[in-house]
């Protein structure tokens, strides 16, 4: 049975990509949007509080994946799906300055 070399190369690349994805998914750093384990949103009360929460989460192994800042809203999206959000002053005033809390499980 003859199998073309290009087909073997393509299959090899696909297997390698799957192995890399599986290793990242097992380590909690899934680069793809699936499987979706949901997310949790933390609303910070100030920019300093947001930076402190991001630093605290990083110290406990939940690192920042990327930032999405737009029109007064500052967001840090973490590797586990956690979103640390700082809304504009107008929005916080409508919510009477309400913020939220986040829990960390210590091993």
Image (cartoon, rainbow, N blue to C red):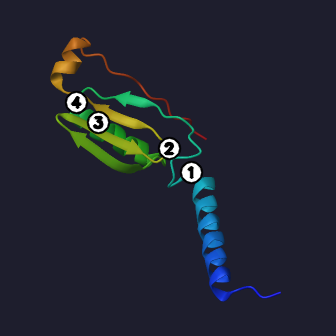
State the residue position of label 2. 80
Q: Are marks 4 and 3 in contact (CB under 8 Å)?
A: yes
| Viewer-nearest of discs 2 and 3 | 2
Q: Which mark is residue 46?
A: 4
* Classed neighbour count for the residue bearing mark 4: other residues with Cα under 10 Å, few (<14), some (14–19), many (≥20): some
Question: How far apart are the two marked residues, 2 and 3, measured between alpha carbons?
Answer: 17 Å
Rounded to the nearest angstrom, the CA distance separating label 4 from label 3 is 6 Å
**Mark 4 against mark 1, which lies toward the viewer?**
1
In the rendered image, residue 89, in percent from the top left (x then y), is placed at 16, 23
The front one of 84 and 46 is 84
Q: Secondary structure at mark 2?
A: loop
What residue is at 61 percent from the left and 41 percent from the top? Answer: 107
Query: Residues under labels 4 and 2: Cα distance?
Result: 23 Å
Disc 4 from disc 1: Cα separation? 29 Å
Above/below status of 89 relative to 58: above
Which element type, helix, strand or loop, lies under badge 1?
Answer: loop
Q: Residues within 10 Å of mark 3 (few under 14, many from 20)?
A: many
Decide which of 42, 10 is in the foreground and name it. 10
Residue sitting at the far right:
1
Q: Secondary structure at mark 4?
A: loop
**Which residue is labeled 1 in the image?**
28
Mark 1 burial class by Cα count in 10 Å: few <14, some 14-19, many 20+: few
The mark found on residue 50 in the picture is: 3
């Amino acid at each position: 049975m003859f199998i073309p070399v290009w087909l073997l190369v393509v299959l090899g690349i696909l297997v390698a990509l799957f192995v890399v994805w599986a290793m990242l998914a097992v380590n909690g750093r899934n680069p793809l949007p699936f499987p979706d384990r949901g997310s949790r949103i933390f609303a910070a009360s100030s920019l300093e509080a947001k930076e402190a929460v991001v630093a605290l989460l990083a110290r406990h192994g939940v690192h920042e994946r990327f930032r999405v800042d737009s029109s007064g809203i500052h967001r840090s999206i973490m590797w586990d799906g956690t979103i640390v959000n700082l809304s504009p002053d107008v929005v916080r005033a409508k919510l009477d300055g309400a913020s939220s809390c986040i829990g960390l499980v210590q091993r």
